[in-house]
Amino acid sequence: MSSKYWLFKSEPEVFSIHDLKRAPKKTTQWEGVRNYQARNFLRDEIKKGDQVLFYHSRKDPMAVVGTAIVTKDGYPDPFQFEPNSKYYDPKSSSENPRWYLVEIKLDQIFSKPVTLKEIKGNAALKDMVLVQKGSRLSIQPVRSKEWNAIVQAGHL
DNA sequence: GCCAACGTTGGC
DNA sequence: GCCAACGTTGGC
C-alpha cells in the first residue's frame, strides 16, 4: 500500500497534540511503537511529506484533534538501545534493529476535534481502520477521501 | 477501572 | 509449530 495519509494514536496524558505544539520546532520523534504491523509502516511505508491525523485515545473526548506532517523517514528507534528507557528491548541490536520511528511536525490543531462518536456515525467513514472491530493498530493508513472528510469536519 | 479483543511468549 | 498463559490496548 502506498498511502500518503496516516493516523497516529496517542494517549493525551502521555503525549498530546499540545505537547507537540510546545516541542522544539513543533517536531517530535514518534518513539515507543512496539507492534510489528505498525513497525512495518514506520520502517517501510511512511515517508517525509506524508500527512498524519493526530488522534487522542483513552481519554474523553476520543477524537482526531489535528494534523501533522512527516519530516523524517523511518530510522531505528534509539530508545530500544537505552537500558533505562521503558522502551528498552534487550533482544534488539544496532546491527539488526527491531523498532523504528519517524519524526513528525505539527501542522494544525483543529478548531473542532472530530470525535470517535462522530466518525462512527458517518457512513462515509465506516471503512476507516480506526473503527474496524478489534483494531488496536496505533499507526494506520488513511484513505484520501477519509482524510478530506475529517479535515473538513475539523474546521466546522 | 473493567475487560474484550488482540498480540506475544515459551513450554512442550 | 501448537496453544495456554500472559501482557497490552483502548473503548466503555
Image (cartoon, coloured by chain):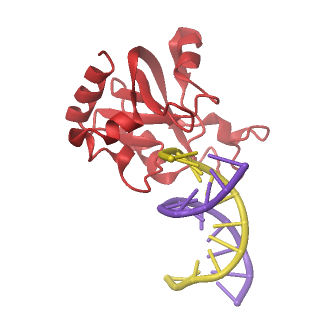
Chain colours: A red, B purple, C yellow
Pick the residue in front: A131 or A26.
A131
Pick the residue in front: A5 or A54.
A54
Question: Is residue A82 something one can see in this rendering?
Answer: yes
Query: Which residue is drawn at the image coordinates 36% and 31% (left, top)?
Result: A47
Pick the residue in front: A42 or A53.
A53
* Relative to A56, residue B3 above or below: below
Query: Which residue is drawn at the image coordinates 46% and 23% (left, top)?
Result: A104
* Relative to A112, residue A60 above or below: below
Query: Which residue is drawn at the image coordinates 60% and 27% (left, top)?
Result: A15
- Image position of A124 (left or right of C4): left
* Relative to A152, residue C11 above or below: below
- Image position of A53 (left or right of A56): left
How many numbered discs sit on the rendered protein?
0
Residue A22 placed where, x, y %? 58, 11
Residue A28 placed where, x, y %? 55, 22
Q: Using the rendered view, name the quadrant where residue A117 is placed.
A: top left
Question: Is residue A91 something one can see in this rendering?
Answer: no
- Image position of A64 (left or right of A147): right
Q: Using the rendered view, name the quadrant where residue A48 is placed.
A: top left
Pick the residue in front: A124 or C2.
A124
Query: Which residue is drawn at the image coordinates 69% and 49% (left, top)?
Result: A89
Residue A36 placed where, x, y %? 50, 53
**Quadrant in the picture for the C terminus of chain A:** top left
